[in-house]
Image: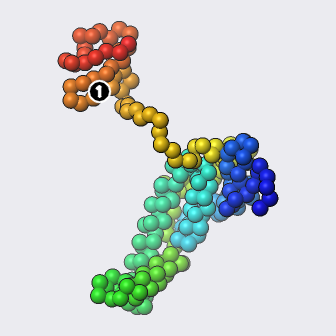
């Protein structure tokens, strides 16, 4: 690796002048290519293909943490599809049933159980059985496609390094959703009064901050 302010480390572009990190444009373009396979006319997916796409999106979310909030339906759909593959193989493949039984046998050796678990997991994830793309998953894929496409025309996928480092906070604070008051139990309150609200509306034992 060259000594430079801008380097690629483990697939991530690190800029020590701007003090931020991001993924290469070529990687984003590759993910967009995979996403465009899930066009509105497509009705189904295979687990291995969706897992490949999800893994790449998780990698991008490592430096653009807001992206992880757009992935719940992908995780749910993949988990459900893997479970469906287990049921399908258990009902149609004798060797899979034998391995599944061995993987759950408490009296089998640890090595044998681990081997059987690996074989069944590999078979379930590699199964070519197709699964339906539901409305929620389709909308999520469409939204992610739009977001990543926008990143090529101005939306940044880079994140300051300081936002990714876990640190001990210098202070802690608590709040709730109320716009004019915050309460603490038992019977101690700290309230902010909006103009026009009189102290007669306060609970007994409340203190006032204006």
Side of 70 relative to 99 (left or right): right
Q: Name the residue at 61% across, 61% down.
A: 56
Name which residue lies at 36% across and 27% down: 178
Q: Position of residue 74 (x, y in %)?
A: 51, 59
Please name whichever residue, 72 or 173, is drawn nearer the observer in this view of the structure. 173
Q: Is residue 3 shown to the viewer in this render?
A: yes
Quarter-of-image position of residue 138: bottom right
Q: Residue at x 58, y 63 (%)?
A: 55
- Assess disc 1: are there few (<14), some (14-19) or many (≥20) residues with their C-alpha within 10 Å of its C-alpha: some
Image location (x, y in percent) of residue 75: 48, 60
Question: Looking at the picture, does residue 125 appear above or below residue 167?
Answer: below
- Front residue of 101 and 153: 101
Q: Where, by quadrant of the figure, is residue 25 drawn?
A: bottom right
Location of mark 1 (residue): 183
2 horizontally vs 163: left or right: right
Compared with 2, 184 (above or below) is above
Left or right placement of residue 46 versus residue 89 in this view: right
Q: Does residue 136 sit above or below 52 in this rendering?
A: above
């Amino acid at each position: 690796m060259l000594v430079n302010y801008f380097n690629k480390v483990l697939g991530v572009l690190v800029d020590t002048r701007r003090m931020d990190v991001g993924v290469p444009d070529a990687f984003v373009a590759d993910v967009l290519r995979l996403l465009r396979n899930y066009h509105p006319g497509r009705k189904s997916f295979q687990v291995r293909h969706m897992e490949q796409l999800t893994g790449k999106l998780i990698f991008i979310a490592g430096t653009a943490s807001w992206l992880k909030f757009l992935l719940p339906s992908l995780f749910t759909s993949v988990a459900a599809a893997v479970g469906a593959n287990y049921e399908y193989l258990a009902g149609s493949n004798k060797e899979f049933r034998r391995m599944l039984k061995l993987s759950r046998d408490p009296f089998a050796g640890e090595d044998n159980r681990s081997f059987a678990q690996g074989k069944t997991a590999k078979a379930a994830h590699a199964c070519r059985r197709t699964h339906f793309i539901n409305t929620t998953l389709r909308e999520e894929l469409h939204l992610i496609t739009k977001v990543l496409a926008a990143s090529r025309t101005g939306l940044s996928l880079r994140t300051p390094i300081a936002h990714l480092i876990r640190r001990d906070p210098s202070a802690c604070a608590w709040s709730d959703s109320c716009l004019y008051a915050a309460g603490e139990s038992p019977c101690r309150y700290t309230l902010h009064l909006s103009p026009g609200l009189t102290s007669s509306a306060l609970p007994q034992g409340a203190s006032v901050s204006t």
